[in-house]
Each structure stands twice: as C-alpha cells, then as structure tokens.
Image (cartoon, grey):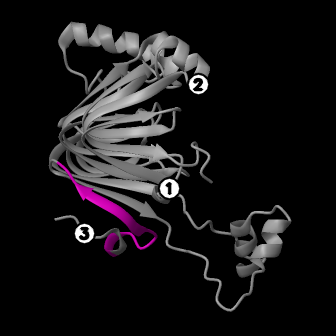
Amino acid sequence: MPVSPSVQYPHWKLIDEARGKGTHWQVLGYPRFVVLGNDVVDASRILAAGKDLRAAALAAATPHDEPVHPLHPIQHARVTLDNSAVYLEPGALQFMKGRIQIDVGVGAGGGGVGGLLRRAATSIASGESMVRPKYSGSGEIFLEPRRDHLMLVEVDDAQLMCDRGMFVACDASLTLDAHVLGVKGASQGGEGISMPVLRGNGVAMLASPVPLDRILRVQLQDEELKIDGPFAMMSVGKLQFSVERAAGFLGSAAGGEGFLNVYRGTGEVWLNLVEARCF
C-alpha cells in the first residue's frame, strides 16, 4: 500500500491524490510557504501603485539572504503502479524505480491501422503528439516538475475532453483519442482544431494554466450550456460538444453575436475565469 510522500520523501508536501485502476496518483509540492507573521503590508498603497500584492508580501516577509519561494510551489507528480499501467505525454518522465516496462508505441488510441491513420491526421492538425509511451508494471514514476497547476480528474464510465496541451498522463484503462472540429469549426468557436478526448474509467492528470480557485465548475443535469468565447477548458461526463451559430444569420449579425460553444447532456464543464476576464 503506497504511503504518504512525507514518509519516504520529506522534501515534498502532498497537495492532491487519487486512486485509479491499480494506480495511486499524487501531486506533490515543495512545503516551504511564506509566513507573514507580524509584518504589516499596506495593501491599498501597493495596489494603487499598480504593483503585484503577492510579490510585495513575499518581499516583505522573506529575508534578503534567502530565495523567495512562491505561494504556489513548483509541483511534482508521483504515480505508484501496482501491476498496472499508465500513459504519459512524451517527455513527462523525470525518473522511475521498480519493475516497470516502457512501450513506446502509438498507444492509447486503439483501432488498428485505421486508428493509427486517424491519429496521425489529428496529430498533424492539432500539433499534439500521437505517440504516448505506456509504462506498465510495479513501482514509482516521477514526472518532470512543472510551474503550472496539476489536477487529478476521475473519469467514471464517461468522456473527458480538454484544451490542447492540458493532457499530462492517465490510467491505461482510458482510451485517448481526439475530438476534431475542423478548421471552420475551430475558427468559429475559438477552440483548437483538435482537442484530446479520454473515454472509459480511470484517473487523468491535467495541467491547468490557472489554480482551481480560478475555475468555475458548472454542473449540468441533462441540460444545455452555451458559451460565448473559448474559455471552457475541460468537460467531463456524458456531454456532446458542438460549435453553433448564436441565432439566425440576420439576428446574429444585428445582435453582435457570432458562434457559441455548446455543451449538452450531463456532466461538468470547467470555465477559466482568468481567460473570461473575471480577474
């Protein structure tokens, strides 16, 4: 049974974890956080001067002879395998130990020759790699440290679709493919030509440009969500996605609206509030 990273690796603090199909996923961060203590920071004056409040608070609280550690530390990820397997994005591995084999095949998509050709075409269109190494066996895998925000999402007999570049790793029990919008649909909806799609049961690890408190998680129960802009970053559940005209041609032009990103069904859609200009 995997134990907390603080027992084996005191350098790290456990930030998040999830259990998949014979896998134990952990997001780890360096544990040194700044404590302001009795230092007084004039927030109103700092903001009026157009300066970053967090940077000023860190500078006030950190001795000049020590390095400044950000409030959101660089994150590592550890995946413990128990006679199981995972897919990783190429280049994601930092080091591993145990009895783990690497299969550098096309991976994750299935579908034989037809699936291979389809993934090759979507890879060219989207800029994503169609080769995702498969790691199988028992042991520990550590991924390259990152400055963005790692998030674990459990997929339960459902579909997960995310923005290009967000996929990091997943259980090998999930099938990884692509949702192709085409050039016309991508330009109209503001999304990429092709977006990664995972189907089945298991855990997926995604990299977000913003922390969880900057994400609005919209729940749908056999409902419809229409979004005017490309700030939907991820959806999970039993949802259908399409790009549609806001109204009739004349009404759309008169109202200043164009095309909307539409989600229908039951599930959850994550909206990037920073990209939506809420901050």
Residue 167 x, y percent position in the rendering: 40, 37
Image quarter hosting the C terminus: bottom right
Image quarter hosting the N terminus: bottom left
Label 3 vs label 1: CA separation? 26 Å
Q: Is residue 30 left or right of residue 254?
A: left
Q: Amino acid at mark 2?
A: Gly
Q: Which residue is mark 2?
A: 255
Label 3 vs label 2: CA separation? 57 Å
Label 1 vs label 2: CA separation? 34 Å
Q: Which corner quadrant of the image does residue 182 belong to?
A: top left
Residue 211 numbered tag: 1
Q: Which residue is mark 3?
A: 3
Residue 131 x, y percent position in the rendering: 36, 23
Q: Nearer the viewer, residue 14 or 177?
A: 177
Mark 1 residue element = loop
Q: Is residue 278 left or right of residue 128?
A: right
Q: Is residue 199 left or right of residue 95?
A: left
* Circle nearer the N terminus (3, 1): 3
Q: Which corner quadrant of the image does residue 162 belong to?
A: top left
- Give above or below for 128 relative to 167: above
Mark 2 residue element = helix
Residue positioned 78% across, 77% down in the render: 64
Determine whether label 3 and label 2 are within 8 Å by CB: no
Q: Amino acid at mark 1?
A: Pro
Residue positioned 23% across, 7% down in the render: 114
- Give above or below for 170 relative to 278: above
Residue positioned 53% across, 51% down in the render: 210
Q: State which region is magenta.
A: 7-20
